[in-house]
Amino acid sequence: MNKPHSDTRLQRWAVVAGIVLLGFNLRPVAVSVGPLLAEVEQGLGMGEVATALLTSLPVLAFAFFGALAPAAAGRAGLHRLTFLALLAVVGGLLGRSATSSVPLFLLLSMVALAGMAAANVLLPSLVKLHFPNRIGLLTALYTAALSVGITVSSVFTVPLAVQFGSWRGGLAFWAVAAAVAAVPWVLLLRHDAALRTRRRSISLWQVARTRLGWTMALFFGLQAAQAYTVFGWFAQVYRDAGFSPAHAGMMLGLVTGVSIPLSLWAPNAVARTSNQTRLMLGLITCYPLGYLGLAVAPVSGAWLWALLVGVGMSIFPVVLTLIALRSRTADGTAALSGFAQSVGYGLSAIGPFGIGLIYHATEGWVWPMLALSVVGVATAVLAVSAGRSQYIEDQIGS
């Protein structure tokens, strides 16, 4: 499906602004809790079980609500659902910041995360619909905005809480950013009425019966498993190697920081190149090289291993670009995105959990790094299959 013919110049700029602002708001709802987790626990009297559930909600939301998003978009309209998703983020963030009830805090957190999960799935479809010939560029813009959103919310949530005098203010502030992101989509709501008559929904069940659907789901899941393992465990890797907490945090910042400039380059590069597999393998190979380096020389090569793992993490925006490139229509993109991300995020939860088990069982990082290296190799194998020119609509016969 090509860009809607009724797009005016103002509306096209509204789409660009909406996509970038939406990308920025995909993670603060989840990331902002971590820096204030101790204050939230104390303020609400939250027990260990509730705390564990709170930290697990993002993955659960991605898996469940991400799967529902394509069908919901078919009924409500792609732009309308995007707008409603942002309203859910705003309402959930404001509501949970005002309540003193632990169950209600968890419920409202899930409301905000549901909006985030739906928007996460819809973004590739929005890019495909409005900019079918600029998929790499637009994906680069919103994944870079996503990375900035992660960094900004991680760094500024605590200072904001101090400024407002409470953890509630630090969490509620991000509702303002989500509200601003909703504004451009108001200009695009009327598109849905015109598009609904031309759209034929593709179900997740149809995608689940294709080879490409499972290839993309496993590909997405393995890269996400490695990313979440890095987020959850790599600071501990460096601390166990003798680094101070501040230095270990800086090394983790280096890992995640490397992906910001690469996320501006990689999506456009993979969309333009005729050999997508070679580019993806070049990025993914950095993962096991970094892991093996951390296993044998975590101190002497610390900066190099961090850089290599950071380069490997830039495969994330490439996978999002590939989802759009492996479909002919916005409907196909939405269905493939929903299936790949819901299954993939569910699979990704195994990563940090499994690596944690291996770490505690072996009391060291050699075997966990070897296990991650195997995951990296498996990701490379899937990249070869995902890199072939193929379309989801062809495989489901639509």
Image (spheres, grey):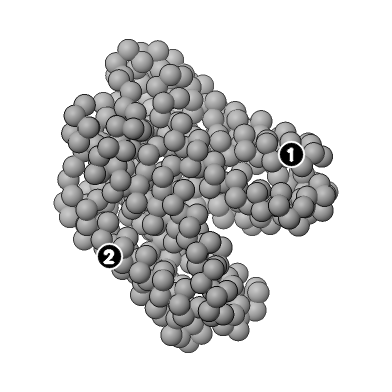
Q: Is residue 250 above or below residue 33?
A: below
Residue 226 spot, x, y in % from top left? 44, 61
Query: Which kind of residue does numbered mark 2 sit on?
Result: Gly
Q: Is residue 127 above or below residue 44?
A: above
Tell me the element at label 1. Answer: helix
| Front residue of this view, candidates 247 and 335 | 335
The mark closer to the camera, 2 or 1, is 1
Residue 247 spot, x, y in % from top left? 61, 75
Splitting the image into 4 quarters, where does residue 106 fall? top right
Q: Residue at x 56, y 36 (%)?
A: 114
Read off the residue under disc 2.
282
Callout 1 environment at 10 Å: few (<14), some (14 to 19), or many (20+)? few
Q: Is residue 127 above or below residue 262?
A: above
Q: Residue 82, which numbered label?
A: none
**Disc with the residue nearer the chain's start (2 vs 1):** 1
Q: Is residue 387 above or below residue 118?
A: below
Callout 2 environment at 10 Å: few (<14), some (14 to 19), or many (20+)? some
Q: Residue at x 52, y 26 (%)?
A: 83
Tell me the element at label 2. Answer: helix
> Is residue 28 visible to the viewer in this orientation of the structure?
no
Query: Which kind of residue does numbered mark 1 sit on?
Result: Pro
Q: Residue at x 65, y 74 (%)?
A: 245
- Report if the CB atoms under discs 2 and 1 are less than 8 Å apart: no
> In the rendered view, does 312 fall on the left or right side of 38?
left
> Is residue 35 visible to the viewer in this orientation of the structure?
yes
Q: Residue at x 47, y 60 (%)?
A: 351
Q: How many marks?
A: 2
Residue 307 spot, x, y in % from top left? 43, 71
Read off the residue under disc 1.
103
> In the rendered view, does 305 fall on the left or right side of 249?
left
Image quarter where the N terminus lies is top left
Residue 367 spot, x, y in % from top left? 45, 77
